[in-house]
């Protein structure tokens, strides 16, 4: 069967996630005949599980500075042409209730399924055809057409859009097929790694801190590359929470991190003042008003000088109070690593943006081939930014496919 005899589409999109759906809707609304393929049995699996099941679908304060990429300017064009307000307009058109949990972070009041249903309704109205349980194997270009080989047969298209995501959360069906396709067509790939992911402790640190699993507090985590002040959460494997997830995107193996567990005040000065005002107050009592009591207990049990017994502040010298304050204000340690793609929210790295047009997301070397969403070397911070990149890059490609 030659290309003319095969089922023919204007656009074939690989991957039925956030970016793919937005691209399909945009292209379909332009009158393009669109086919979307996905090897899993459901559309938008990562959308469904995001935001604790309530989908942090955008961030009103999205700016290029919220993204990391080898080319920090690449994301600007797409983000400027499809803004958080554009996606919010679609959400409100469908009567979906939403709320702002933190500054700019918009979540569904109901479960994330309402966002998936909204996108499916928009896709259906735009005439998009969706085939699930259809594995993509390979593609080739002959003349102006791509031939796409799948487990359900072959199809042809003028435009082929790769929206397959990265390696993160493989339980959703994530694979590296998009990266393989980029390489097949001669595009450069940048090293990929897990991002927005918890840190793990080595055996010695686990022995000290594993009993803190479930304990959370506000903290400032930083090194010479980045700093984030949000909650951290001790786990059975190491350290998680928003501050850690944010920081992990900027961390490289072998780099130490510094954590201020009491970022809201100068702890040494507060200890000195309290010793003067209330000398009979015990150290553990004073710290317990500022930090989780269990955290205070464990940290004071594992000091270089040995365990600190609870006794009145009047019995501590300035030097001792300074050392105690430093335990909580300057906790320095070396992560053993991260939990990897299994729990990572996104993949950093991927298709080199130098290979793509920032206006259209089209491969410069291969006319008609587009890459959007997580497969591209653009990674957002935590808080709805990666979804906004998915919507914006999908829309950008959808305007031109």
Image (cartoon, grey):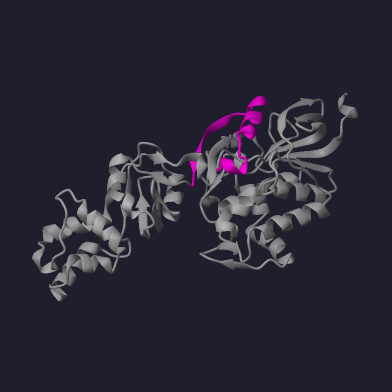
Number of numbered discs: 0
Image quarter (top left, top right, bottom left or bottom right) of the N terminus? top right
Left/right of residue 168 with respect to residue 231 in the rendered view: right
Identified at 16% across, 63% down, the residue is 310
Viewer-nearest residue: 385 or 293:
293
Identified at 39% across, 51% down, the residue is 235
Q: Position of residue 333 (x, y in %)?
A: 30, 45
Identified at 18% across, 71% down, the residue is 274
Left/right of residue 364 with respect to residue 284 in the rendered view: right
Can residue 384 be seen from the camera position used here? Answer: no
- The image quadrant of residue 165 is top right
Q: Position of residue 196 (x, y in %)?
A: 49, 47
Q: Which residues are magenta?
A: 169-196
Q: Position of residue 95 (x, y in %)?
A: 72, 68
Can residue 372 be seen from the camera position used here? Answer: yes
In the rendered image, residue 307 lying in the magenta stretch gets the answer no
Identified at 19% across, 51% down, the residue is 303
Image quarter (top left, top right, bottom left or bottom right) of the C terminus? top right
Left/right of residue 119 with respect to residue 302 in the rendered view: right
């Amino acid at each position: 069967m030659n290309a003319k005899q095969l089922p023919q589409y204007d656009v074939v999109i690989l991957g039925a996630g956030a970016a793919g759906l937005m691209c399909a809707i945009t292209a379909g609304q332009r009158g393009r005949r669109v086919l979307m393929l996905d090897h899993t049995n459901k559309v938008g699996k990562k959308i469904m599980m995001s935001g604790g099941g309530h989908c942090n679908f955008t961030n009103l304060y999205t700016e290029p500075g919220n993204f990391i990429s080898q080319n920090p300017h690449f994301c600007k064009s797409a983000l400027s042409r499809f803004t958080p307000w554009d996606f919010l307009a679609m959400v409100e058109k469908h009567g979906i209730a939403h709320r702002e949990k933190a500054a700019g972070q918009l979540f569904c009041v109901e479960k994330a399924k309402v966002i998936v249903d909204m996108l499916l309704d928009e896709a259906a109205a735009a005439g998009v055809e969706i085939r699930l349980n259809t594995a993509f194997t390979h593609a080739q270009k002959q003349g102006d057409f791509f031939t796409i080989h799948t487990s359900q047969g072959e199809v042809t298209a003028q435009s082929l859009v790769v929206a397959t995501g990265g390696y993160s959360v493989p339980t959703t069906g994530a694979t590296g097929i998009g990266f393989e396709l980029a390489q097949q067509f001669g595009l450069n790939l940048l090293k990929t790694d897990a991002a927005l992911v918890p840190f793990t402790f080595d055996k010695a640190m686990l022995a000290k801190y594993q009993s803190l699993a479930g304990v959370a507090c506000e903290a400032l985590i930083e090194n010479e590359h980045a700093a984030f002040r949000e909650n951290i959460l001790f786990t059975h494997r190491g350290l998680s929470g928003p501050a850690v997830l944010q920081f992990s995107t900027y961390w490289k193996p072998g780099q130490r991190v510094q954590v201020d567990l009491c970022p809201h005040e100068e702890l040494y000065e507060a200890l000195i003042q309290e010793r003067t005002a209330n000398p009979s107050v015990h150290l553990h009592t004073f710290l317990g008003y500022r930090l989780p009591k269990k955290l205070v207990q464990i940290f004071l049990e594992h000091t270089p000088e040995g365990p600190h017994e609870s006794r009145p502040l009047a019995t501590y010298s300035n030097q001792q109070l300074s050392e105690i304050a430093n335990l909580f204000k300057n906790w320095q340690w070396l992560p053993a690593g991260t939990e990897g793609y299994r729990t990572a929210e996104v993949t950093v790295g991927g298709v080199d943006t130098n290979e793509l047009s920032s206006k259209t997301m089209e491969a410069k070397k291969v006319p008609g081939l587009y890459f959007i969403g997580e497969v591209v070397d653009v990674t957002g911070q935590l808080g709805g930014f990666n979804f906004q990149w998915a919507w914006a890059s999908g829309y950008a490609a959808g305007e031109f496919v």
